[in-house]
Image (cartoon, rainbow, N blue to C red):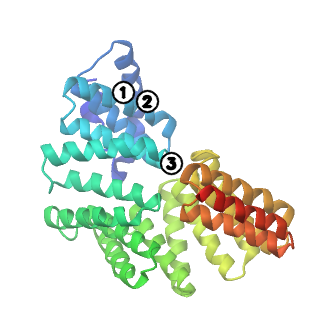
Amino acid sequence: MRIVNPSFPNPKFENWPICDRLLPHALACSRFINIFSMESAEEGLLLSRAGYYLNQRAEYAQAEPLYQRALAIDERALGAEHPDTAASLNNLAVLYYDQAQYNDAEPLFRRALAIRESVLGPEHPNAATTLNNLAELYRTQGHHQEAEPLYRRALAIREKALGTEHPDTAGSLNSLAVLLDNQGKPAEAEPLYRRSLAIREKALGPSHPMTATSLNNLAELYRRQNRNQEAEPLYRRALEIKEKKLGPEHPSTATGLHNLAGLLVQQGKFEEAEPLYRRALAIHEKALGPEHPNTATSLNNLAGLLSEQGKSVEAEPLFRQALTIREKALGPEHPRTVIVRNNLIQFYRKQGRNAKADALKKGAKGKAK
C-alpha cells in the first residue's frame, strides 16, 4: 500500500499510461484491503483513484465496488462530513449517472454538494464540480429549468476561482452550451461551444478527448442548422481522436460514430451511415448494457435508417425496443421518449397501419394521466 498509493497518479487522461501499468497492483491492494479490513484514508484514496480510472475507461463493473469500498472507508476513517467523503460520494454518483441509474445518483450528488458547500465554501471549485454534475443529471432527465441555474453558478465559480482559460471552465461552457442547444437556442450556444473548444485546444491540446467532445458538440449544432460542410470535418476529427485515444470500443467513440452517421443520413448517404450506426449500437450494448438510454438512441436511429431504406420488418422491433428502454429509464413523458414514440407512430402511419398508430398514441395519453 505504501509503495503503490503514492505511485498511482491523479487519473486524468495524461496519466492513463501510468495508471494502466499500476492498475494490477492497485487491484491487488484492493483485495488485501478487503481481506484485512484495512480502513485508513490512504486505502480510501487508492481505491478512489483506481475506481476513477476504471470509470473513465468505461469499466463500470470493476469501478463500482472500488468506489463503494472507498466511500465506506472515508465515512469511517474521516467522517461523514469530510471533503474526501464528498469526493467519494460525487465519484460514485458519476458512475451511477454514466449507467443511467439516475435515482441512485441524485441523492449522492446532493449529499456531496451539501458537504462541499458547508466545509469548503459555496465558491470552491469542488462545489462547482458537483453543481455541474447535478445539472447534467437534471438536463438528461429533461429538467432544464432546474439545470440551468446550476450550470451558470458552476461556470461563475470556475471563472472566478480557476480563471477564464482553465479546462474546468471550458467544461462548464460546454455543458451550458449543450443545454441551450437542447432548448433551441443555437445563437446562444454557438459562442460557448467555440470558446470551450478554443480553451481545450490550448490547455489540453488538439488531440485530447475533451477537445474531441467540444468538436463533436459544435458539429452537432452545425448539423442541426444544415451547415453540413462545416460539421463534417469536425465530426471526423473528433471520431479520429476518440478512436485513437480512448479506443474503438469506448462509449464516447460510439457517440462519435453515431453522430457522423446522422450527418451522412442527412446527406442521403444511407449505405455509408448504416455500418456506423450498427457499430455504435454494438459498442453501446457491450459497454453500457441493453437497457441504457444511449443504447436506445442507437436503436432508434438505426431503425429510422432501415425504415427509410424500406427494411420495415427489421426496423419495427428496433423502434419498439428503443421505446421500451426509454420509457423504463427516462419515463413515458420525457422528451427523448416522446421522440421515439412519435417515430414509431409515423412508421405505422407510413405503412397504413393506423390502428396501431392510434393505439400507441392513446396508450401514451393514458400513461401521461
Instruction: Tell me if 345 is positioned left or right of 353 in this view.
Output: left
Q: Quadrant of the N terminus?
A: top left
The residue shown at (14%, 61%) is 161
The amino acid at mark 2 is: Pro
Residues tagged 2 and 1 counted as in contact (Cβ below 8 A): yes
Q: Name the residue type under label 3.
A: Ala
- Which type of secondary structure does the marked residue at label 3 adopt? loop
Tag 2 or tag 3, which sits nearer the N-term? 2
Q: Picture coordinates of residue 261 (x, y %)?
A: 64, 71
**Residue 66 appearing in the image:** yes
Residue 269 position in % (x across, y down): 72, 79
Q: Extreme top residue here?
A: 36
Residue 100, which numbered label? Answer: 3
For the point 39% across and 85% down, which residue is it? 187
Residue for badge 1: 69
Q: Is residue 18 visible?
A: no
What residue lies at 78% left-to-right and 56% top-to-bottom?
317
Q: Find disc 2 in the rendering and name its residue.
A: 65
- The amino acid pointed to by label 1 is Arg
Q: Nearer the viewer, mark 3 or mark 2?
A: 3
Q: Give the camera-side residue of 338 and 173.
A: 338
Query: Is 68 situated above or below 199?
Result: above
